[in-house]
Image (spheres, grey):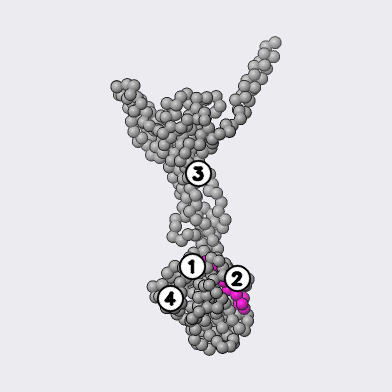
Amino acid sequence: MPGSKNVLVCLQFVSLWLQAHTQTAPSVGLLPERRLDTIGAYTLVNSRQCQRLCWYRLLCTSFSFHDNAGQGSNCVLHSSHVEDAPTVDHNPPEWSEHIVQSPSSTANNNNNNNNNINVCSMSRPCAPAEVCVPESNRASRCASLPAHCGDPNPIPDANFAVSSRIQGALAALHCASDFVEIPRNVSMEIECQVNGRWTAVPGECMQAVYRHPTTPLQVPLPWLPWDGWKACLKGVFAGTQRMYLDLLTANKQDSVVHIDFRHDWWPYTETLLVTTSVGGWFPQQPYYLGTSPPMLLQQDDVFHVMLHYDVTGDALLIELLRNDVEQSTWSVPLTGTPRLDLTPARFLSVSSDPTLTYVNLVAGC
Protein backbone atom coordinates (compact mmCIF):
# COMPACT_ATOMS: atom_id res chain seq x y z
CA MET A 1 0.00 0.00 0.00
CA PRO A 2 1.27 3.51 -0.81
CA GLY A 3 0.74 4.69 2.76
CA SER A 4 2.76 1.83 4.22
CA LYS A 5 5.61 2.54 1.80
CA ASN A 6 5.74 6.18 2.93
CA VAL A 7 5.80 5.12 6.58
CA LEU A 8 8.67 2.71 5.84
CA VAL A 9 10.67 5.45 4.12
CA CYS A 10 10.11 7.77 7.09
CA LEU A 11 11.27 5.12 9.54
CA GLN A 12 14.41 4.48 7.48
CA PHE A 13 15.14 8.22 7.44
CA VAL A 14 14.69 8.50 11.22
CA SER A 15 16.96 5.48 11.73
CA LEU A 16 19.70 7.00 9.58
CA TRP A 17 19.34 10.36 11.33
CA LEU A 18 19.68 8.77 14.77
CA GLN A 19 22.78 6.86 13.66
CA ALA A 20 24.35 10.04 12.38
CA HIS A 21 23.60 12.02 15.55
CA THR A 22 24.32 9.47 18.25
CA GLN A 23 27.89 8.63 17.31
CA THR A 24 30.20 8.23 20.29
CA ALA A 25 32.54 11.22 20.66
CA PRO A 26 36.22 10.50 20.02
CA SER A 27 38.03 9.40 23.16
CA VAL A 28 41.24 11.20 22.25
CA GLY A 29 41.62 14.96 21.99
CA LEU A 30 39.21 17.83 22.46
CA LEU A 31 36.62 18.47 19.76
CA PRO A 32 37.61 21.68 17.93
CA GLU A 33 34.20 23.28 18.54
CA ARG A 34 34.78 23.02 22.31
CA ARG A 35 38.15 24.75 22.33
CA LEU A 36 38.32 28.20 23.88
CA ASP A 37 39.90 29.65 20.75
CA THR A 38 37.01 28.58 18.45
CA ILE A 39 35.42 31.48 16.56
CA GLY A 40 33.13 29.60 14.18
CA ALA A 41 32.01 26.14 13.03
CA TYR A 42 30.66 25.32 9.55
CA THR A 43 29.83 22.44 7.21
CA LEU A 44 31.78 22.78 3.94
CA VAL A 45 32.70 20.67 0.95
CA ASN A 46 36.48 20.66 1.26
CA SER A 47 39.41 22.06 3.22
CA ARG A 48 40.07 24.75 0.60
CA GLN A 49 36.70 26.34 1.37
CA CYS A 50 37.56 26.18 5.06
CA GLN A 51 40.93 27.83 4.32
CA ARG A 52 39.23 30.65 2.41
CA LEU A 53 36.70 31.26 5.15
CA CYS A 54 39.48 31.49 7.73
CA TRP A 55 41.47 33.88 5.54
CA TYR A 56 38.45 36.12 5.00
CA ARG A 57 38.23 36.74 8.77
CA LEU A 58 41.06 38.90 10.04
CA LEU A 59 41.43 37.31 13.48
CA CYS A 60 41.38 33.71 12.24
CA THR A 61 44.86 32.18 12.56
CA SER A 62 44.17 28.47 11.96
CA PHE A 63 41.40 26.08 10.98
CA SER A 64 40.53 22.46 11.78
CA PHE A 65 38.95 20.24 9.13
CA HIS A 66 37.84 16.66 8.63
CA ASP A 67 36.41 15.04 5.49
CA ASN A 68 33.29 13.48 7.01
CA ALA A 69 30.66 16.21 6.64
CA GLY A 70 27.81 13.90 7.62
CA GLN A 71 28.34 14.38 11.35
CA GLY A 72 27.76 18.10 11.73
CA SER A 73 30.34 20.84 11.33
CA ASN A 74 33.56 19.77 9.65
CA CYS A 75 35.28 23.19 9.45
CA VAL A 76 36.20 24.99 12.68
CA LEU A 77 38.00 28.33 12.77
CA HIS A 78 40.42 29.28 15.55
CA SER A 79 42.01 32.53 16.69
CA SER A 80 45.16 33.20 18.70
CA HIS A 81 43.69 36.62 19.57
CA VAL A 82 41.80 35.04 22.46
CA GLU A 83 42.69 35.10 26.12
CA ASP A 84 44.12 31.74 27.30
CA ALA A 85 43.96 30.28 23.78
CA PRO A 86 45.63 26.83 23.58
CA THR A 87 49.07 26.73 22.02
CA VAL A 88 49.06 23.03 21.06
CA ASP A 89 46.87 20.85 18.88
CA HIS A 90 44.18 19.23 21.06
CA ASN A 91 42.15 17.84 18.16
CA PRO A 92 41.05 14.20 17.85
CA PRO A 93 43.01 12.16 15.26
CA GLU A 94 40.40 12.51 12.49
CA TRP A 95 40.78 16.30 12.58
CA SER A 96 43.70 18.13 11.03
CA GLU A 97 44.63 21.69 11.97
CA HIS A 98 46.30 24.09 9.55
CA ILE A 99 47.82 27.53 9.88
CA VAL A 100 45.94 29.92 7.63
CA GLN A 101 47.64 31.00 4.41
CA SER A 102 46.46 33.30 1.67
CA PRO A 103 44.33 31.38 -0.84
CA SER A 104 45.88 33.56 -3.58
CA SER A 105 49.30 31.98 -2.94
CA THR A 106 47.85 28.54 -3.70
CA ALA A 107 46.07 29.88 -6.76
CA ASN A 108 49.28 31.41 -8.10
CA ASN A 109 50.95 27.99 -8.02
CA ASN A 110 48.21 26.56 -10.25
CA ASN A 111 47.37 29.52 -12.44
CA ASN A 112 49.76 32.17 -13.69
CA ASN A 113 46.85 34.41 -14.59
CA ASN A 114 45.44 35.71 -11.31
CA ASN A 115 43.13 38.35 -12.76
CA ASN A 116 40.15 36.55 -11.30
CA ILE A 117 41.53 36.55 -7.75
CA ASN A 118 39.43 38.95 -5.69
CA VAL A 119 40.60 41.40 -3.03
CA CYS A 120 39.61 38.97 -0.26
CA SER A 121 42.13 36.42 -1.51
CA MET A 122 44.97 38.92 -1.93
CA SER A 123 44.66 40.71 1.39
CA ARG A 124 42.68 40.83 4.62
CA PRO A 125 41.10 44.26 4.28
CA CYS A 126 38.24 44.01 6.77
CA ALA A 127 38.00 44.93 10.45
CA PRO A 128 38.16 42.29 13.23
CA ALA A 129 34.35 42.19 13.57
CA GLU A 130 33.79 41.84 9.79
CA VAL A 131 34.14 39.20 7.11
CA CYS A 132 35.37 39.82 3.57
CA VAL A 133 32.71 38.83 1.01
CA PRO A 134 33.82 38.25 -2.62
CA GLU A 135 31.36 39.65 -5.13
CA SER A 136 32.87 39.52 -8.63
CA ASN A 137 36.34 39.23 -10.14
CA ARG A 138 38.43 41.67 -8.09
CA ALA A 139 35.50 43.16 -6.20
CA SER A 140 34.58 42.44 -2.59
CA ARG A 141 32.89 44.05 0.38
CA CYS A 142 33.23 43.87 4.16
CA ALA A 143 30.15 42.57 5.95
CA SER A 144 29.53 42.84 9.67
CA LEU A 145 30.06 39.52 11.47
CA PRO A 146 30.68 40.28 15.15
CA ALA A 147 30.68 37.65 17.87
CA HIS A 148 28.10 37.98 20.61
CA CYS A 149 28.80 37.47 24.31
CA GLY A 150 26.25 36.65 26.99
CA ASP A 151 26.13 38.24 30.42
CA PRO A 152 29.51 38.38 32.21
CA ASN A 153 29.98 35.78 34.92
CA PRO A 154 28.81 37.23 38.25
CA ILE A 155 31.42 38.51 40.68
CA PRO A 156 30.65 38.55 44.43
CA ASP A 157 29.88 42.01 45.83
CA ALA A 158 30.00 43.63 42.38
CA ASN A 159 28.04 44.33 39.23
CA PHE A 160 28.93 45.03 35.62
CA ALA A 161 27.93 48.09 33.61
CA VAL A 162 27.24 46.51 30.20
CA SER A 163 26.24 48.74 27.28
CA SER A 164 26.74 46.15 24.53
CA ARG A 165 27.45 42.44 24.20
CA ILE A 166 28.95 42.34 20.72
CA GLN A 167 32.59 41.74 19.86
CA GLY A 168 34.86 44.56 21.06
CA ALA A 169 32.38 45.87 23.65
CA LEU A 170 33.67 46.72 27.12
CA ALA A 171 31.97 46.09 30.46
CA ALA A 172 33.13 47.86 33.61
CA LEU A 173 33.16 46.21 37.03
CA HIS A 174 31.74 48.29 39.90
CA CYS A 175 32.16 47.16 43.48
CA ALA A 176 29.27 47.29 45.92
CA SER A 177 29.08 49.86 48.71
CA ASP A 178 31.76 49.35 51.40
CA PHE A 179 33.90 47.34 48.96
CA VAL A 180 36.89 48.39 46.81
CA GLU A 181 38.54 46.86 43.78
CA ILE A 182 41.83 45.05 44.14
CA PRO A 183 44.51 45.46 43.00
CA ARG A 184 44.64 49.24 43.09
CA ASN A 185 44.89 51.40 39.98
CA VAL A 186 44.06 48.54 37.58
CA SER A 187 41.35 48.87 34.95
CA MET A 188 38.40 46.65 35.86
CA GLU A 189 37.06 46.48 32.31
CA ILE A 190 36.49 43.23 30.44
CA GLU A 191 36.09 42.83 26.67
CA CYS A 192 33.83 40.68 24.50
CA GLN A 193 36.20 38.57 22.39
CA VAL A 194 35.93 37.09 18.92
CA ASN A 195 35.13 33.67 20.44
CA GLY A 196 32.01 35.00 22.15
CA ARG A 197 33.58 34.96 25.62
CA TRP A 198 34.47 37.84 27.92
CA THR A 199 38.07 38.30 28.98
CA ALA A 200 38.84 37.43 32.59
CA VAL A 201 38.19 40.02 35.28
CA PRO A 202 41.62 41.44 36.25
CA GLY A 203 40.72 41.76 39.94
CA GLU A 204 38.00 41.40 42.54
CA CYS A 205 36.10 43.35 45.16
CA MET A 206 37.14 43.26 48.80
CA GLN A 207 35.50 44.72 51.87
CA ALA A 208 37.05 47.97 53.09
CA VAL A 209 34.37 49.36 55.41
CA TYR A 210 32.94 47.59 58.45
CA ARG A 211 29.93 48.95 60.32
CA HIS A 212 29.44 48.01 63.97
CA PRO A 213 31.91 45.11 63.86
CA THR A 214 32.42 42.99 66.95
CA THR A 215 35.68 42.95 68.88
CA PRO A 216 38.22 41.51 68.96
CA LEU A 217 38.43 42.42 65.27
CA GLN A 218 40.91 40.98 62.76
CA VAL A 219 40.26 41.85 59.09
CA PRO A 220 42.44 41.82 55.95
CA LEU A 221 43.67 45.05 54.41
CA PRO A 222 42.22 45.28 50.87
CA TRP A 223 45.19 47.32 49.64
CA LEU A 224 48.77 47.26 50.86
CA PRO A 225 49.68 50.51 52.62
CA TRP A 226 51.01 53.12 50.22
CA ASP A 227 52.18 56.72 50.57
CA GLY A 228 49.13 58.67 51.69
CA TRP A 229 47.25 55.61 52.99
CA LYS A 230 44.73 56.35 55.74
CA ALA A 231 42.58 54.24 58.01
CA CYS A 232 39.81 55.29 60.36
CA LEU A 233 38.32 53.70 63.46
CA LYS A 234 35.35 55.01 65.40
CA GLY A 235 33.80 53.69 68.57
CA VAL A 236 33.34 53.92 72.32
CA PHE A 237 36.04 53.03 74.81
CA ALA A 238 34.23 50.61 77.09
CA GLY A 239 37.07 49.78 79.48
CA THR A 240 39.35 51.53 81.90
CA GLN A 241 42.81 50.25 80.99
CA ARG A 242 43.88 50.08 77.35
CA MET A 243 43.09 49.48 73.69
CA TYR A 244 45.33 47.60 71.26
CA LEU A 245 45.56 48.42 67.57
CA ASP A 246 47.87 46.27 65.43
CA LEU A 247 48.88 46.04 61.79
CA LEU A 248 49.79 42.36 61.39
CA THR A 249 51.88 40.49 58.85
CA ALA A 250 50.52 37.63 56.75
CA ASN A 251 51.00 35.10 59.56
CA LYS A 252 48.60 37.14 61.76
CA GLN A 253 51.08 36.89 64.62
CA ASP A 254 53.75 39.55 64.13
CA SER A 255 52.90 43.23 64.40
CA VAL A 256 54.34 45.61 61.85
CA VAL A 257 52.99 48.35 64.08
CA HIS A 258 51.63 47.86 67.61
CA ILE A 259 49.75 50.83 69.09
CA ASP A 260 48.90 50.61 72.77
CA PHE A 261 46.55 53.24 74.23
CA ARG A 262 47.53 52.85 77.89
CA HIS A 263 45.55 54.40 80.71
CA ASP A 264 45.87 53.79 84.44
CA TRP A 265 48.36 50.99 83.98
CA TRP A 266 51.61 51.23 85.94
CA PRO A 267 54.29 52.37 85.10
CA TYR A 268 53.10 53.89 81.80
CA THR A 269 50.07 55.75 83.10
CA GLU A 270 48.24 57.71 80.40
CA THR A 271 50.84 57.05 77.71
CA LEU A 272 50.56 56.15 74.03
CA LEU A 273 53.07 53.46 73.01
CA VAL A 274 53.92 52.59 69.41
CA THR A 275 56.39 49.90 68.42
CA THR A 276 57.16 46.94 66.18
CA SER A 277 57.05 43.45 67.65
CA VAL A 278 58.04 41.24 64.72
CA GLY A 279 59.51 38.01 66.03
CA GLY A 280 58.13 38.22 69.57
CA TRP A 281 55.45 39.67 71.79
CA PHE A 282 57.73 41.89 73.87
CA PRO A 283 58.96 44.69 71.59
CA GLN A 284 62.39 46.21 71.64
CA GLN A 285 63.01 49.96 71.94
CA PRO A 286 59.40 51.16 71.76
CA TYR A 287 58.33 54.73 71.02
CA TYR A 288 56.78 56.32 74.11
CA LEU A 289 54.87 59.26 72.79
CA GLY A 290 54.31 61.07 76.03
CA THR A 291 51.50 61.77 78.47
CA SER A 292 49.75 64.58 76.64
CA PRO A 293 46.80 64.88 76.64
CA PRO A 294 46.59 63.88 80.34
CA MET A 295 43.89 61.29 79.73
CA LEU A 296 44.13 59.41 76.41
CA LEU A 297 40.88 57.49 76.76
CA GLN A 298 38.48 57.26 79.64
CA GLN A 299 35.56 54.93 80.13
CA ASP A 300 32.64 55.67 77.77
CA ASP A 301 34.70 58.12 75.68
CA VAL A 302 33.63 58.39 72.05
CA PHE A 303 36.79 58.25 69.95
CA HIS A 304 37.97 58.67 66.37
CA VAL A 305 41.40 57.25 65.58
CA MET A 306 43.02 57.88 62.20
CA LEU A 307 46.27 56.42 60.89
CA HIS A 308 48.06 58.30 58.11
CA TYR A 309 51.06 56.71 56.37
CA ASP A 310 53.07 59.73 55.24
CA VAL A 311 56.16 58.40 53.47
CA THR A 312 56.92 61.83 52.01
CA GLY A 313 56.92 63.31 55.50
CA ASP A 314 58.85 60.29 56.81
CA ALA A 315 56.29 59.58 59.53
CA LEU A 316 53.27 57.58 60.65
CA LEU A 317 50.69 60.04 61.93
CA ILE A 318 48.27 58.97 64.66
CA GLU A 319 45.33 61.26 65.27
CA LEU A 320 42.95 60.89 68.21
CA LEU A 321 39.67 62.76 68.66
CA ARG A 322 37.86 62.37 72.01
CA ASN A 323 34.18 63.20 72.34
CA ASP A 324 34.40 65.45 69.27
CA VAL A 325 36.34 67.99 71.34
CA GLU A 326 39.90 67.08 72.33
CA GLN A 327 42.21 66.21 69.45
CA SER A 328 45.86 65.22 69.50
CA THR A 329 48.29 64.12 66.81
CA TRP A 330 51.42 62.04 67.25
CA SER A 331 54.13 61.61 64.66
CA VAL A 332 56.13 58.38 64.66
CA PRO A 333 59.31 58.61 62.52
CA LEU A 334 59.71 55.96 59.86
CA THR A 335 63.48 56.03 60.23
CA GLY A 336 65.50 55.15 63.27
CA THR A 337 65.67 52.03 65.42
CA PRO A 338 63.44 50.15 65.12
CA ARG A 339 62.37 51.36 61.70
CA LEU A 340 58.62 51.39 61.09
CA ASP A 341 57.83 49.85 57.70
CA LEU A 342 54.14 49.34 56.93
CA THR A 343 54.55 47.57 53.58
CA PRO A 344 54.45 44.02 55.10
CA ALA A 345 51.09 44.80 56.79
CA ARG A 346 48.24 42.51 55.70
CA PHE A 347 45.70 42.62 58.55
CA LEU A 348 44.23 45.13 61.00
CA SER A 349 43.56 43.94 64.53
CA VAL A 350 41.71 45.76 67.31
CA SER A 351 41.33 44.22 70.74
CA SER A 352 40.75 44.82 74.44
CA ASP A 353 38.02 47.27 75.47
CA PRO A 354 36.51 49.23 72.56
CA THR A 355 33.02 48.96 71.11
CA LEU A 356 33.58 49.74 67.43
CA THR A 357 30.96 51.49 65.32
CA TYR A 358 32.87 52.12 62.07
CA VAL A 359 36.13 50.96 60.46
CA ASN A 360 37.42 52.22 57.11
CA LEU A 361 40.64 50.65 55.86
CA VAL A 362 41.27 52.91 52.86
CA ALA A 363 40.17 56.40 53.92
CA GLY A 364 40.39 58.81 56.83
CA CYS A 365 37.67 59.77 59.27
Q: Nearer the viewer, mark 3 or mark 2?
A: 2
- How far is disc 1 from disc 3 in space, using C-alphas? 37 Å
87 relative to 64, above or below? below
Mark 3 vs 2, N-terminal side: 3
For mark 3, give the secondary structure.
loop
Relative image position of residue 162 (x, y in whole percent): 50, 50
Mark 3 in CB contact with mark 4 (< 8 angstroms) = no
Relative image position of residue 48 (x, y in whole percent): 42, 26
Q: Tell me the number on the disc at residue 334.
A: 4
Mark 4 in CB contact with mark 2 (< 8 angstroms) = no
Mark 3 vs 4, N-terminal side: 3
Relative image position of residue 218 (x, y in whole percent): 58, 69
For mark 1, give the secondary structure.
loop
Which residue: 51% across, 38% down? 35
Residue that carries the numbered disc 3 in the rendered image: 197
For mark 4, give the secondary structure.
loop
Give the residue type at disc 2. Leu
Q: Tell me the number on the disc at residue 82.
A: none
Mark 3 in CB contact with mark 2 (< 8 angstroms) = no
- How far is disc 1 from disc 4 in space, using C-alphas? 14 Å
Give the residue type at disc 1. Pro
Residue that carries the numbered disc 1 in the rendered image: 344
Give the residue type at disc 4. Leu
* Quadrant position of the N terminus in the picture: top right
172 relative to 57, above or below? below
Segment tinted magenta in the rendering: 345-355
Nearer-the-camera pick, 19 or 258: 258
Q: Is residue 119 left or right of residue 158?
A: left
